[in-house]
Image (spheres, rainbow, N blue to C red):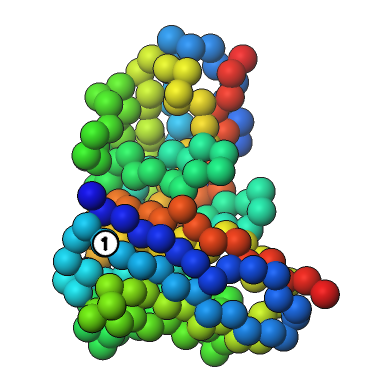
Amino acid sequence: EVQLVESGGGLVQPGGSLRLSCAASGFTFSSYSMNWVRQAPGKGLEWVSYISSSSNTIYYADSVKGRFTISRDNAKNSLYLQMNSLRAEDTAVYYCARPRYCGGGSCNFDYWGQGTLVAVSS
Amino acid sequence: EIVLTQSPGTLSLSPGERATLSCRASQSISSSLAWYQQKPGQAPRLLIYGASSRATGIPDRFSGSGSGTDFTLTISRLEPEDFAVYYCQQYGTSPPTFGPGTHVDIK
């Protein structure tokens, strides 16, 4: 059974940093690209970042470019999101998502974690 | 960036009725469109990909159609568990983008 379990969320002050993790199991993690998608409270879904299976290709949404860094450790079946210079508008539930299909780094998603809440507030 | 527009914003229907949800893209995405269902406190669930292919385990009362810029998700007969928010998503070009969602609630 495919499982994605996020962790690392919490309350952080504006300008602060947080590192999210996603532990994957039930599939060959190293064969899949992975993504982060977020959802602000009561709002819709927003794609955040993409990383290819070998980490060779990485994309970011314009809203997080230069502040967030996606990475992975295939030996540990884990995906990460380092978030720096956090803003109030980064407050959201962050999901890691496994693609069913990707074309040019743009994917649809067939498995999602349960999400981890990041709250940016003073 | 491709903008997706969903209509209506809210659809109030009774169990057993047919639901028709629309999604329009700001430019052609061929058939690179997916539909997701999300219930409160849960992650989204993939229903449809490639505009019309049902994902694994999705009941056949869910169907998708369309190509280019205009797409439709149809739920033939609403079951109680179908009342939720539905999002369309395009993956034809980067960045992938989502529509604002359609709330399907009980009338």
Residue B65 shows in the view: no
Q: Amino acid at mark 1?
A: Ser
The spot of residue B13 in percent (x, y) is 55, 16
Instruction: Tell me if residue A81 comes above or below residue A103 in the rendering.
Output: below
Up/down of A54 relative to A99, above or below? below
For the point 49% across and 67% down, the residue is: A7
Side of B5 relative to A55 (left or right):
right
Res A119 quadrant in image: bottom right
Helix, strand or loop under label 1: strand
Q: On the image, which quarter does residue B36 sit in?
A: top left
Q: Position of residue B45 (x, y in %)?
A: 38, 43
Q: Nearer the viewer, residue A16 or A38?
A: A16
The residue depicted at 32 percent of the width and 28 percent of the height is B62
Q: Does residue A103 sit above or below B59 in this rendering?
A: below
Parent chain of label 1 = A
Quick one: B37 or B41, which is closer to the camera?
A: B41
Horizontal and vertical percent for residue B16? 43, 10
Residue closest to the eye, A76 or A59: A76
Which residue shows up at 42% across the image and 81% down it? Answer: A70
Left or right of residue B29: residue A5: right
The crowding category of the residue bearing disc 1, from other C-alpha atoms within 10 Å (few below 14, some 14 to 19, many at least 20), is some
Residue receiving disc 1: A25
The quadrant of the picture occupied by the C terminus of chain B is top right
The residue that appears at 58% across and 76% down in the rendered structure is: A63
